Image (cartoon, rainbow, N blue to C red):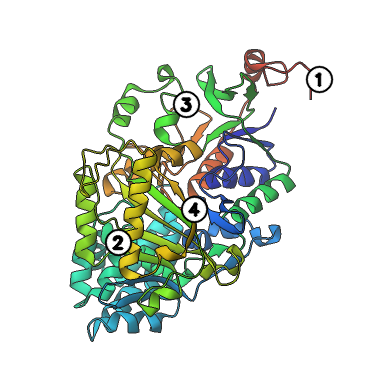
Amino acid sequence: MPDAVVIGAGPNGLVAANLLADAGWSVEVLEAQDEPGGAVRSDRGVHPDFISDMFSAFYPLAVASPIIDGLGLEREGLRWAHSEHVLAHPLTDGRCAVLSRDRGVTSASVDSFAAGDARGWENLHAIWDRLREPLIDALFTPFPPVRSGLTLAARLRAGGGLRVARSLVLPVRRLGEEEFAGEGGRLLLAGNALHADLAPEAAGSGGFGWLMSMLGQTYGFPVPVGGAGALTSALVSRLERKGGTVRCGERVTEVVVRGGRAVGVRTAAGEGVVARKAVLADVAAPDLYGKLVGPAHLPHRLLQDLRRFQWDFATFKVDWALSGPIPWTAEGARGAGTVHVADGVDELTRFAAQIAMSLVPDRPFSLVGQMTTADATRSPAGTESAWAYTHVPHRVRDDAGGDGLTGRWDKRENETMADRVEEQIERLAPGFREKIINRRVLAPPTLEQLNANLRGGAINSGTTNMHQQLIFRPVPGAGRPETPVPHLYLASASAHPGGGVHGAPGANAARAALRRRYGSGIFSTAQRALGSRGRTGRKPGAS
């Protein structure tokens, strides 16, 4: 009988399991898929000579996170690689905004769009210099972040107070207009805001775009050498070295509640696993509440609030094996690991508005990953392992592109949308399509099939908009990992602080579990309910 059962072997579940194991707890992680990692996995499914990241690929938050850093994953063989430039945003007229870990390179790029704009970038970076330490601490600690919050408030007051706070809650379009005369800085901020589901006119998108830009400036957008799966392998290796176990192909169908508290789980195979101290769920909130936990065990208000839960944008992804690097017209894009494809902030607004109107975008904004550019181990010399993802509505009302896409995402629709993504890249990189050896399409239903937490291809387990952050995440008043069921903790990106590979939701859940005092009176009942060894479906003594 383990002390804790963790549902889901995504990065948050594995971080939680590692921290519990560090505290001396016995931990068992149950994963529905045939391999661990959640949205941090890689394969050779596009071409046997090419490593492709199936979901996430670049990890600035992982490198910035004191939680990930504290695990010492380099001892498990994890290594990071960087491209020459962090990010580029080319335009069809040949200009290109470049984000670099060298601040001077970034400032010069921004200034090339309008003389004097380097000063605007330096001003934004000066705010980051003052706020970085307490801001990162506040992001990666349980809500409310009392100590780091006080430090952050003090530095805000000393550095401009309400004026700085106002800038960070601005829509990113307005922030860019206030800080920059030219398009360069505006493009970097707005493109980074759309790494989440934040339109250029959304309140708070300025702060998010600024944060992602500054993370890239400081830490880069690094990738694990050998593929995203190397990060997962390091987390699993560390956990197993500490005595924890990961069991794949074990889909949990129920969190078992006895005596008003969580005592274990039941799997699709009918097996029951007793958890002596806690159950931690790296599961999207709508799947935990009302599905894994029966409605009878939950407050009526929570179930009502979940009806208002909003997913982030659906995602459509294409992977490529390319015979050579993408032939960008803009030189700055050639050495960038990440490239934003949209011809200006107005086109970003148009794209987001089409999704808001339930239209499949006709000129989809894409994030392009040049993985061999970032990590030479990903494909043979002279080739490129690449991908792009864009967003589409969860429910499609019409197709702005006139091809009759309906959101069924059958073979015809997948190929049509993939062609549309490629056409946008071709505008900026003539000859791109001639370099395609193979491609793989991952439409929203496929992404969800490969990882149930990616509901309809939503990659952040809930919108990043302000109405579902902090004390509103996943529902109002639920900003902490504790749930209404004692000894059950929400450890997924549906919990504060949300999406991204940084481990904070898992770490917060683990710390909450460790702070609680546990008794043992309920466990004889739980064992009888779930099996004499804590598992049903196995005879005593069976292996």
- Residue 481 drawn at (x, y percent): 46, 39
The residue carrying pointer 2 sits among few (fewer than 14), some (14 to 19) or many (20 or more) residues within 10 Å by Cα, namely: many
Mark number, residue 207: 2
Q: Name the residue under label 4.
A: 501
Q: Mark 3 points at which residue?
A: 485
The secondary element bearing badge 1 is classed as loop
> Going from the N terminus, do you reach mark 3 or mark 2 first?
2
Tell which tag, 4 or 3, sits nearer the viewer: 4
- Residue 367 drawn at (x, y percent): 38, 60
The residue type indicated by label 2 comes to Gly
Tell which tag, 2 or 4, sits nearer the viewer: 4
The residue carrying pointer 3 sits among few (fewer than 14), some (14 to 19) or many (20 or more) residues within 10 Å by Cα, namely: some
The secondary element bearing badge 3 is classed as loop
- Residue 469 drawn at (x, y percent): 33, 46
- In percent of the image, x 44 and y 32: which residue is there? 483
Q: Mark 1 points at which residue?
A: 541
